[in-house]
Amino acid sequence: VGPAVSNSLATSPTERMVSMSTLFAASVHVHRMCRQNWQSVGQAGLALIGGGAGRDPTQLVMYEPATKRPFSVTCIRAQLQLTVTSQQQISLEDDQRECWSAFFAEPEQAMIFLQHTTLARAAAVSHSSECLTQDIIPGEGVPAQVGDVVGVRQTSWRRPELLLPCTSSPFGAQVETVGDLAKPL
């Protein structure tokens, strides 16, 4: 994992490297929605490119592994919707309004990808008071209905100043954990 693209606005080599880095990369199996049906695209690379001081938006890039040629590029915005369909599968709509589904080899890869993406979404928020949420693991059991009593646990994290490449959780310091899954609200 290293620098992906240099930023012409950055002034030093270190600043350029931190400004546009590969924050996350994985090999995934990709499907594309075509005429209301999922069609297999096959193995592909998936990378989050960006970070740094916020001069350039973070991008989610899916690419052909042999040629490294991108076939989908999406700027990460606060409004980006990532749907967790299983512990290893995530679906999204890209900037060209194409629907994609990515299947990760391991559940932990999907979780780390979602954490990185959520931080990139948070970096794109214009108001620091906005709260972003992202499912990381799909729910289990029967969905809650209106009038049901449910237990909820929420963990808040402080967003790091810079988004940096890492192979584990990219979150900064944990701020708080509230609630209990076993106790209703």
Image (tube, rainbow, N blue to C red):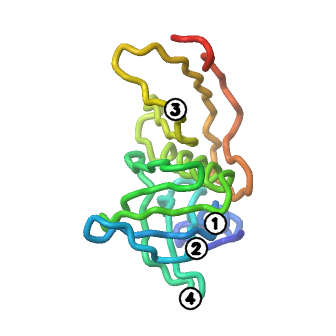
Question: Which comes before the other along the chain, label 3 or label 4?
Answer: 4
* Mark 3 touches mark 4? (CB < 8 Å): no
Which residue is tagged 1?
25
User: Looking at the image, which residue is at 50% across and 84% down?
Assistant: 69
> In the image, is residue 181 above or below residue 11?
above
Count residues near mark 2 (Cα–Cα under 10 Å), then give few for <14, some for 14-19, many for 20+.
Answer: many
Q: Amino acid at mark 4?
A: Thr
CA–CA distance in space, label 3 to label 1: 31 Å
Count residues near mark 3 (Cα–Cα under 10 Å), then give few for <14, some for 14-19, many for 20+.
Answer: few
Question: Which comes before the other along the chain, label 4 or label 2?
Answer: 2
CA–CA distance in space, label 1 to label 4: 16 Å
**Where in the figure is residue 21, as x and y percent of width and height?**
63, 65
Which residue is tagged 4?
67
The quarter of the image holding the N terminus is bottom right
CA–CA distance in space, label 2 to label 1: 7 Å
Which residue is tagged 2?
45
* Mark 4 touches mark 2? (CB < 8 Å): no
* Mark 2 touches mark 1? (CB < 8 Å): yes
> In the image, is residue 97 above or below residue 142?
below
**Where in the figure is residue 53, as x and y percent of width and height?**
58, 54
Which residue is tagged 3?
141
